[in-house]
C-alpha cells in the first residue's frame, strides 16, 4: 500500500511530467482552459496514457527486444491509434475540445511516459501512467485557474504578454512543486 | 531588422507548439543546447525536404501518417547517431530526444501552409539560438560553468535556482520578452488581439 501511495504521489506531485519533467509543457501552458474543460482534457489524457502503457509495455518487452531502434516509431504509431480510437468513442464528450485533446494526447508527455515506463515492471508502469495522468490533469487545472484568476494581461508589460507571462505563471507552480523535493 | 521580424513572425507560437519544454531542458547546459538544436534543425529540415518532395504524390488522407513515419525515422536516426558520437549530450537530454518526434508532428500540424524547407530552416535556427542563449545564462550564472568547465571567479556567486527547473521558465520568459521588445513582434500580436 505504501509503495502504491508513493508511486501515486510521485507521479502527481514530485515527478510531475508537465512542469518538472518538462514533457508536454507547451500543450499545458499554451492555453488557459475552463475548469470543466481542463478536467475533461486531463481525464482524456490520463486514459490515453494508461492505454498506451498497456499496449507499449508488452510491445517493447516481447516484440522490440531485438529491435530497439524501432521503439520511437512503434510508440508514436500506438499513440496515434489510441488517440483516434478514443476520439471516435468519446466523440460526444470530446466535441467541445477535440483539437485540444489531440494536441495534449500527441504531446511529448505520453511518448516520454511510454519510453520511461519500458524500464519498469508492468504493474508499476500502469500505476505510474495513471499517476502521471492525474498529475497532468492537476497541472492543467491549476495553471488555468492561476492564469485566468491572477493574471491581468492588460497590467502585464507589452513585452511579457503572451508566452513569457504564461511561462512565469507556470514557474510559480513549479516553485510550489519543487518545495516538495526541497530543491531550488 | 524588418526582414528579421518578417522571418520571425509567428515564431514564438511555433516555439510553444514545438515544445518550450525542450528549450528549458536543453537550456541548462551549452552542450545540450547545441546538441538539441542540431537535432531539431536536422530533423525538421530533413523531414520537410522529404515531405516537400513527396507532397504531390501522397494523397491528403495519408499525409499525417506519412509525415509521422518520416519524422520519427529521422529522429530515431539522429538519436542513434548522437548516441554513438555524443553520448554525454544524449544522457543530458534523456527521453526528450525521442519526445521531440511528436512535437515535430504537432508543429507541422499547426502549419496551415504547404511544407516549406526555408520555414523549417528558420525555425530550427531560431530554436537553436534561443536554447544557446538560455544555456549561456543558466549554465554561466546558475552553475558557474561553461561547456562543463567551471568558471572559478563565479563559483561564490552562482545562483543555483537558475540551473534548476524554475530557472528554465524564468530565463526563457525573460529571453522571449527581450526578443519581443527588440523585434517588436509582440506589439503586432497585441494589436491583433485588441
Image (cartoon, rainbow, N blue to C red):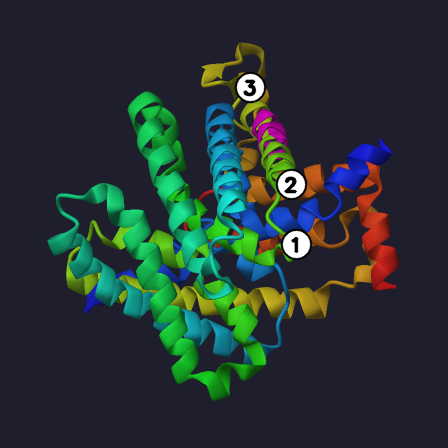
Judge depth for marks 3 and 2 and give the one in front: 2
Does B132 lie within the magenta span? yes
Q: Left of B27 or right of it: where is A181?
A: left
Query: What residue span does the magenta drawing correspond to?
Result: B129-137
Check if mark 3 and mark 2 are on a common chain.
yes
* Residue that carries the numbered disc 1 in the rendered image: B113
Q: Position of residue B38 (x, y in %)?
A: 50, 29
Asked if disc 1 and disc 2 are in contact, CB closer than 8 Å, the reply is yes
Q: Which mark is residue B156?
A: 3
Does A153 lie within the magenta span? no
Residues at marks 3 and 2, CA–CA distance in whole angstroms = 43 Å
Residues at marks 1 and 2, CA–CA distance in whole angstroms = 10 Å
Read off the chain for label 3.
Answer: B
Q: Which quadrant is home to the N terminus of chain B?
A: top right
Q: Which mark is residue B73?
A: none
The residue sitting at 11% across, 55% down in the picture is A62
User: Dot 3: within a 10 Å radius of its alpha carbon, few (fewer than 14), some, or many (20 or more) residues?
Assistant: few
Badge 3 marks a residue whose secondary structure is helix
Amino acid at each position: 500500500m505504501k509503495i502504491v501511495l508513493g508511486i501515486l504521489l510521485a507521479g502527481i506531485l514530485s515527478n510531475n511530467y508537465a512542469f518538472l519533467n518538462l514533457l508536454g509543457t507547451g500543450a499545458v501552458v499554451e492555453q488557459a482552459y475552463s475548469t470543466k474543460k481542463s478536467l475533461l482534457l486531463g481525464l482524456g489524457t490520463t486514459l490515453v496514457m494508461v492505454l498506451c502503457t498497456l499496449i507499449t509495455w508488452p510491445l517493447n518487452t516481447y516484440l522490440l527486444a531485438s529491435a530497439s531502434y524501432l521503439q520511437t516509431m512503434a510508440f508514436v504509431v500506438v499513440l496515434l491509434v489510441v488517440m483516434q480510437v478514443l476520439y471516435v468513442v468519446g466523440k460526444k464528450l470530446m466535441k467541445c475540445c477535440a483539437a485540444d485533446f489531440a494536441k495534449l494526447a500527441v504531446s511529448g508527455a505520453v511518448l516520454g511516459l511510454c519510453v520511461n515506463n519500458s524500464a519498469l515492471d508492468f504493474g508499476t508502469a500502469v500505476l505510474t501512467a495513471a499517476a502521471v495522468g492525474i498529475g497532468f490533469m492537476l497541472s492543467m487545472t491549476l495553471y488555468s485557474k492561476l492564469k485566468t484568476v491572477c493574471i491581468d494581461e492588460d497590467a502585464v508589460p507589452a513585452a511579457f504578454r503572451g508566452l513569457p507571462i504564461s511561462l512565469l505563471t507556470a514557474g510559480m507552480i513549479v516553485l510550489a512543486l519543487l518545495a516538495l523535493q526541497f530543491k531550488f | 531588422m524588418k526582414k528579421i521580424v518578417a522571418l520571425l513572425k509567428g515564431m514564438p507560437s511555433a516555439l510553444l507548439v514545438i515544445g518550450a519544454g525542450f528549450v528549458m531542458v536543453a537550456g541548462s547546459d551549452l552542450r545540450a543546447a547545441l546538441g538539441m538544436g542540431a537535432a531539431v534543425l536536422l530533423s525538421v529540415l530533413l523531414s520537410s525536404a522529404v515531405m516537400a518532395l513527396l507532397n504531390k504524390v501522397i494523397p491528403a488522407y495519408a499525409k499525417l501518417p506519412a509525415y509521422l513515419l518520416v519524422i520519427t525515422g529521422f529522429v530515431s536516426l539522429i538519436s542513434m547517431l548522437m548516441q554513438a558520437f555524443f553520448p554525454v549530450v544524449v544522457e543530458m537530454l534523456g527521453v526528450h530526444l525521442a519526445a521531440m518526434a511528436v512535437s515535430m508532428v504537432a508543429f507541422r500540424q499547426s502549419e496551415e501552409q504547404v511544407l516549406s524547407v526555408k520555414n523549417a530552416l528558420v525555425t530550427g535556427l531560431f530554436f537553436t539560438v534561443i536554447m544557446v542563449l538560455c544555456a549561456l545564462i543558466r549554465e554561466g550564472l546558475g552553475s558557474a560553468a561553461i561547456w562543463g568547465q567551471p568558471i572559478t571567479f563565479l563559483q561564490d556567486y552562482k545562483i543555483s535556482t537558475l540551473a534548476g527547473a524554475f530557472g528554465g521558465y524564468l530565463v526563457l520568459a525573460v529571453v522571449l520578452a527581450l526578443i519581443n521588445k527588440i523585434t517588436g513582434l509582440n506589439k503586432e500580436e497585441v494589436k491583433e488581439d485588441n
